[in-house]
Image (tube, rainbow, N blue to C red):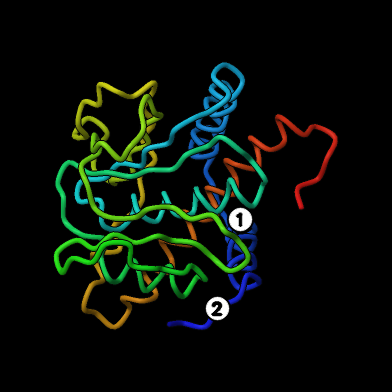
Amino acid sequence: MINTTKKTIIEFFENAEKDLELSEERKDLLFSIADKIIEELEDRDKVNLNFICTHNSRRSQMAQVWSFFASDYFNLDNIYHFSGGTETTAFHRNTVKCLQKNGFIFNVDDFSHQNPRYLISYPGTKKSVLGFSKLYDDNSNNYPYLAITTCDSADENCPFIPDAIQRFHLPYTDPKIADNTDNQNEKYMETSKQIAGEMHFIFEEVYKAFNENETPV
């Protein structure tokens, strides 16, 4: 098991946000997602987030895990984090290795050579999130939910998602392009850092909406 500390993951998360370079269009998209989360929390007192990509093996898994960390970092309750795909594959081993290097702990909940289930946590928390590859409408994904598609293909190529309260297209470049190359680890870390930084951006906005006179810890 990789030896990690809570400090490792917090430093990565905070630096990811500091190093973000966002276009105005991208920033507006992140604000829109934050505003909808705020609206759902005000109206329903809870919100389910479902990050969706074709194979549910890399970007959608990273987004689910960093979303889980971000809501905990900002002490935001009643936000639930899921992911899914249009096909079932597996939580890719390169994604697992990258998130472990970031500081996350993977405990096998149900072993399968094809598609193991992990309880994912980090040092200093008793909370965990369940990670494995599944369809976006799997029974383990609570609904209704906000659908956030993470594929970098055109938005119109993503599936119709009938259970979604609202759908946002937040694309990331697939680190799969670097599999089995010399810059594989660098590409996965680059994608993880971008996702971590943008989850920080979104959830800090949610935090500020409910804590106007406080500074995030």
Does residue 45 appear left or right of residue 192 in this picture?
Answer: right
Please name the residue shown 43% across and 61% down the image. 120
Q: Give the residue pinned by disc 1.
A: 17
Residue 54 circle label = none
Q: Residue at x 20, y 51 (%)?
A: 55
Residue that protrudes farthest toward the top in the picture = 43
**Circle 1 SS class:** helix
Q: Residue 51, position in %: x, y?
A: 36, 42
- How many numbered marks, from 0 up? 2
Residue, disc 2: 4
Verify CB contact (< 8 Å) between mark 1 and mark 2.
Answer: no
Residue 191 vertical placement versus 48 (above, below): below
In the image, residue 102 sits, relative to residue 181, either above or below, namely: above
Q: Is residue 54 left or right of residue 15?
A: left
Q: Where is residue 30 drawn, in percent x and y? A: 52, 37
Q: For label 2, count other residues whose C-alpha is less than 10 Å away and answer few (under 14), some (14-19) or many (20+).
A: some
Question: In the rendered view, does 29 fall on the left or right side of 71?
Answer: left
Residue 146, how many percent across, how many down? 40, 29
- x and y percent of residue 101 in the render? 46, 75
Q: Amino acid at mark 2?
A: Thr
Q: Nearer the viewer, mark 1 or mark 2?
A: 2
Report which quarter residue 48 is drawn in: top left
**Quadrant of residue 24 within the rendered picture:** top right
Give the distance between the C-alpha atoms of the residues marked 1 and 2, in whole angstroms.
Answer: 20 Å
Quadrant holding the N terminus: bottom left
Q: Residue sitting at 34 percent across and 61 percent down?
A: 118
- Which tag, 1 or 2, sits closer to the chain's start? 2
Q: How busy is the neighbourhood of tag 1: few (under 14 within 10 Å), some, or many (20 plus)?
A: some
The amino acid sitting under disc 1 is Glu
Task: In this rendered view, identify the residue nearer to me: 110 or 133.
Answer: 110
The kind of secondary structure element at disc 2 is loop
In this view, the residue in front, 108 or 18, is 108
